[in-house]
Amino acid sequence: MTKKTMSLVAVLLLVLSLGLLPAAAETEENTIYVNIANAGKLEAAMEPIALADADGDGALTVNDALILIHDAKYEGGAAAGFATADSQYDPMITKLWGVENGGSYGYYVNNTMSMGLTDPVAAGDVVYAFVYADAAGFSDAYSYFDKSQAEIADGEELTLTLSKADGFDANYAPIYKPLEGAVITVDGIATQFVTDAEGKAVIKLESGPHIVSATAGETLLVPAVCAVAVQAAAAETSPARTIGIILGIVVVIALIVVWMLKGKKKN
């Protein structure tokens, strides 16, 4: 085999390998993810949002994330469903997802209680805002899984650990403990999976995208959220990738033919 032929074979293999690589996920550099819960009901779950300075203050903040999620998912947008008012220390929410309840709202960034609407937000962050079901006693317990996103193969088991807020420490920081006996829900439907004493549940899901959450009987929870993508056992090749592979093969074959013809003429 000549060096020229070896080079052509290498090119062909490269084209084929590139064509067979999984399609890269289309992610924006400024993408964040937003959850909204209204009195324990998920209204938006791990919604990807392109972060922008929606309020025009020159910073990227929790407030921007909430304006943008309302504009994207609430009928009438932020103008209809979201409002804030100035307070002594920081702007405060006066309406969330169309609910005006006198200020019984909460918001977290990456499962950490936010100090205010002006807290910074960056690409990859998860912002969670909610309306308290217990608007007077604020007894809703924030809960979260150890994973906010997961990708597994069809038939593969996924282990999630569920924790919930259980009071505050001496510095008024929330204390989280494993939640036992919580029923795992998938796309809003209760399953047979239940968390153990360590808050763990081992689940199996059908192929496709799913939103996993949990309920805990009479306990008021701000529901945990995990977006799970279950890949089918035999990944389908998209039409665009198929066309790309075919075109790549045709181009390489044409180059081989041209080079071989040139070689014959020289001989």
Image (cartoon, helix red, strand yellow):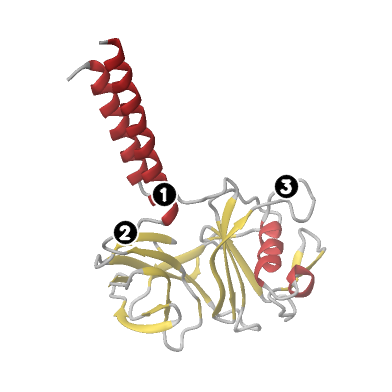
Left or right placement of residue 115 versus residue 53 in this view: left
Q: Which quadrant of the view contains residue 229?
A: bottom left
The residue most toward the left is 1
Quadrant occupied by the N terminus: top left
Residues packed near mark 2 inside 10 Å, few (<14), some (14 to 19) or many (20 plus): few
Q: Decide which of 170, 211 is in the foreground and name it.
A: 211
Q: Earlier in the sequence, mark 2 or mark 3?
A: 3
Q: Tell me which residue sits at (76%, 59%) in the image.
A: 90
Q: Which mark is residue 243?
A: 1
Indicate the amino acid at tag 3: Ala
Q: Earlier in the sequence, mark 2 or mark 1?
A: 2
Label 1 residue SS: helix
| Residue 264 visible, this angle | yes
Residues packed near mark 1 inside 10 Å, few (<14), some (14 to 19) or many (20 plus): few
Q: Where is mark 3, residue-wise?
A: 59
Picture coordinates of residue 190, whole percent (x, y): 38, 84
Left or right placement of residue 50 versus residue 236 in this view: right
